[in-house]
């Protein structure tokens, strides 16, 4: 069983903020694979179903970003899910917009949601699906930037970007992280159209 966790902040005011990219990918997966995220347990919205023939639990923690690990730990314990079967989908300042990268293990890069998950799970060996959101000009602008909505231009590309990120999650589940990384490594999307 895989625990697929999208990171974000709860509430309508944050829905299309850059920091909510993880929530948006999980919404995309739920829609595409007919999984209803209708249950609320352990401070998280949860949906159970199958992706590529594998049992999955889709998760959107409702604890706000900085405390995401509390919900993830309780769910992982409850469903007896190993660290390497946790897939975390999140925004990434270190990647340009229109970039999606898979990663197995590693640090947190200053991402407070990842910091919380690492602290609560006691390890870093989970899988990450990183959605690039770019970085503002000055470090002092970071907090406002991640909590601001995607620009009008970015919103036109967002549906396709979420589909690509969702496909990478599916390939990770069905093929394994190494094969998925080989399939998607190096792909860049300067523009996103239906043909990409």
Image (cartoon, helix red, strand yellow):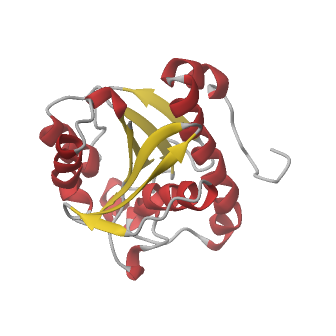
From the viewer's perspective, tell me whether residue 151 is left or right of residue 15: right
Figure quadrant of the N terminus: top left
Figure quadrant of the C terminus: top right
| Residue 95 on image: x %, y % | 51, 41
Residue shown at the point (64%, 64%) measured from the top left:
154
From the viewer's perspective, tell me whether residue 49 is left or right of residue 121: right
Residue shown at the point (52%, 45%) measured from the top left:
50
Q: Is residue 153 visible?
A: yes
| Residue 55 on image: x %, y % | 45, 40
Q: In this rendering, is residue 143 above or below 14?
A: above
Residue shown at the point (63%, 42%) measured from the top left:
167
Residue shown at the point (44%, 55%) measured from the top left:
22
| Residue 138 on image: x %, y % | 38, 56
- Location of residue 41 by image quarter: bottom left
| Residue 21 on image: x %, y % | 47, 58
Q: How many tags in the picture?
A: 0
From the viewer's perspective, tell me whether residue 182 is left or right of residue 80: right
Q: In this rendering, is residue 176 above or below 109?
A: above
Q: In this rendering, is residue 183 above or below 194?
A: above
Q: Is residue 92 visible?
A: no
Depth check: 20 or 73 in front? Answer: 73
In the orientation shown, which residue stands out farthest toward the bottom? 13
Q: In this rendering, is residue 57 above or below 170?
A: below
- Location of residue 85 by image quarter: top left
């Amino acid at each position: 069983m895989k625990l697929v966790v999208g990171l974000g902040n709860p509430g309508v005011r944050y829905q299309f903020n850059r920091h909510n990219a993880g929530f948006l990918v999980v919404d995309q997966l739920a829609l595409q694979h007919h999984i209803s995220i209708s249950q609320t347990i352990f401070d998280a919205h949860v949906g159970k179903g199958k992706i590529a023939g594998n049992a999955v639990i889709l998760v959107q923690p409702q604890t706000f970003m900085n405390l995401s690990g509390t919900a993830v730990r309780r769910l992982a314990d409850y469903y007896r899910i190993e660290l390497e079967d946790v897939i975390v989908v999140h925004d990434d300042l270190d990647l340009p917009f229109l970039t999606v990268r898979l990663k197995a293990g590693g640090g947190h890069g200053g991402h407070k949601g990842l910091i919380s998950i690492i602290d609560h799970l006691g390890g870093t060996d989970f899988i990450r699906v990183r959605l690039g959101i770019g970085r503002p000009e000055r470090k002092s602008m970071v907090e406002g930037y991640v909590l601001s909505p995607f620009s009008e231009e970015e919103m036109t590309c967002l549906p396709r970007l979420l589909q690509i990120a969702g496909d990478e999650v599916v390939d990770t589940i069905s093929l394994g992280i190494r094969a998925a990384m080989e399939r998607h490594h190096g792909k860049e999307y300067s523009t996103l159209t239906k043909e990409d």
